């Protein structure tokens, strides 16, 4: 499985300076080797995107990430992935997958989402306001419990080999409940894969691909730092450094 996800560099790295200390993911200053990895990964995306349902010119674009890694033989490779998922049920088999496996607990997330959909239909069909209000309350509680169960199954490792799920990570950081989709961004997925497969993280970069969203300015191919509200506590746990975000202020 491991070689399938590893991208070999096509570029000559002989004269490229490489720091073996991972760069701060909250600073928008990718190293030279990370930029090279990003450029090569962008070429891969361009060659493959016609196979996906996601039209990046019409639909909102996506954030992607690359992580340069070093194996036990001191060889450099890079891995890449998307933040969130592509539209439809298309999955690119060379993207690092989600930390969460949909098949967990007999596909509890799929079953739970179907139940929520059925409850929504019942609410729309209800002729009684009392019954409707009761169903709305039940759906809200069901949705909350399902989200909590999902967060408990997003488990991350840190450099010392310790593990914690998203709920535990946010609680330990004295933060409010995790926002929806916490754990699905590119950076934590890439680092989790590297740490789980004995690959040393060397350099990381995230970039935008496609149409800019209406809510915020994003430029095609431009680099961006890891997000604050979803990634900060997770990355600080994984990299065992709670100064990462603070040290990036003003940069």
Image (cartoon, rainbow, N blue to C red):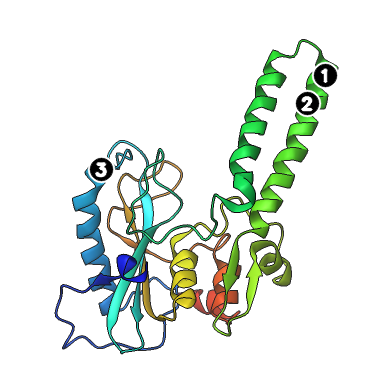
The circle on residue 247 is none
Q: Which residue is drawn at 80% across and 32% down?
A: 137
Position of 65 with respect to 152 (left or right) is left
Quadrant of the rendered structure where residue 177 is? bottom right
Mark 2 element type? helix
Instruction: Estimate the x, y position of residue 115 in percent, counting from the top left.
Output: 67, 32
Residue at x-position 43% and y-position 68%: 190
Left or right, residue 107 beside residue 250 = right
Q: Give me the C-alpha separation between circle 3 and circle 1.
A: 46 Å
- Identify which residue, 75 or 172, lies in the foreground: 75
- Label 3: which secondary element: helix
Q: Mark 2 points at which residue?
A: 135
The answer to whether one can see residue 197 in this image is yes
Q: Position of residue 220 (x, y in %)?
A: 28, 53
The answer to whether the residues at label 1 and label 2 have Cβ atoms under 8 Å apart is: yes
Residue labelled with disc 1: 131
Labels 3 and 2: the sequence-earlier one: 3
Q: In this view, does 33 lie above or below 98?
A: below
Q: Mark 3 points at which residue?
A: 51
Instruction: Mark 3 and mark 1 in contact? Answer it, CB < 8 Å.
Output: no
Please say whether residue 178 is visible from this viewpoint.
no
Q: Earlier in the sequence, mark 3 or mark 1?
A: 3
Q: Give the quadrant of the N terminus.
A: bottom left
**How far apart are the two marked residues, 1 and 2, measured between alpha carbons?**
6 Å
């Amino acid at each position: 499985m491991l070689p399938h996800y590893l991208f070999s560099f096509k570029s000559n790295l002989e004269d490229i300076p490489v720091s073996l200390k991972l760069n701060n993911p909250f600073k928008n200053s990718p190293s030279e080797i990370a930029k090279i990895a990003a450029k090569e990964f962008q070429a891969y995306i361009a060659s493959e995107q016609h196979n996906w349902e996601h039209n990046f010119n019409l639909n909102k674009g996506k954030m992607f990430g690359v992580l340069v890694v070093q194996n036990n033989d001191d060889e450099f490779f890079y891995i890449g992935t998307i933040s969130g998922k592509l539209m439809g049920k298309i999955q690119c088999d060379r993207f690092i997958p989600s930390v969460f496996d949909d098949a967990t607990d007999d596909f509890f997330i799929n079953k739970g989402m179907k139940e929520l959909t059925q409850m929504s239909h019942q609410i729309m069909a209800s002729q009684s306001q009392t019954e409707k209000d009761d169903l709305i309350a039940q759906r809200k509680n069901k949705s909350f419990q399902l989200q909590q169960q999902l967060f408990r199954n997003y488990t991350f490792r840190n450099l010392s080999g310790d593990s914690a799920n998203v709920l535990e990570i946010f609680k330990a950081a004295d933060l409010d409940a995790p926002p929806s989709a916490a754990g699905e961004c590119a950076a934590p997925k890439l680092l989790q894969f590297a740490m789980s497969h004995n690959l040393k993280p060397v350099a990381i970069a995230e970039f935008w691909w496609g149409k800019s969203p209406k809510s915020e300015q994003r430029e095609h191919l431009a680099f961006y730092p890891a997000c604050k509200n979803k990634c900060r506590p997770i990355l600080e746990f994984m990299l065992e450094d709670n100064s990462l975000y603070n040290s990036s202020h003003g940069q």
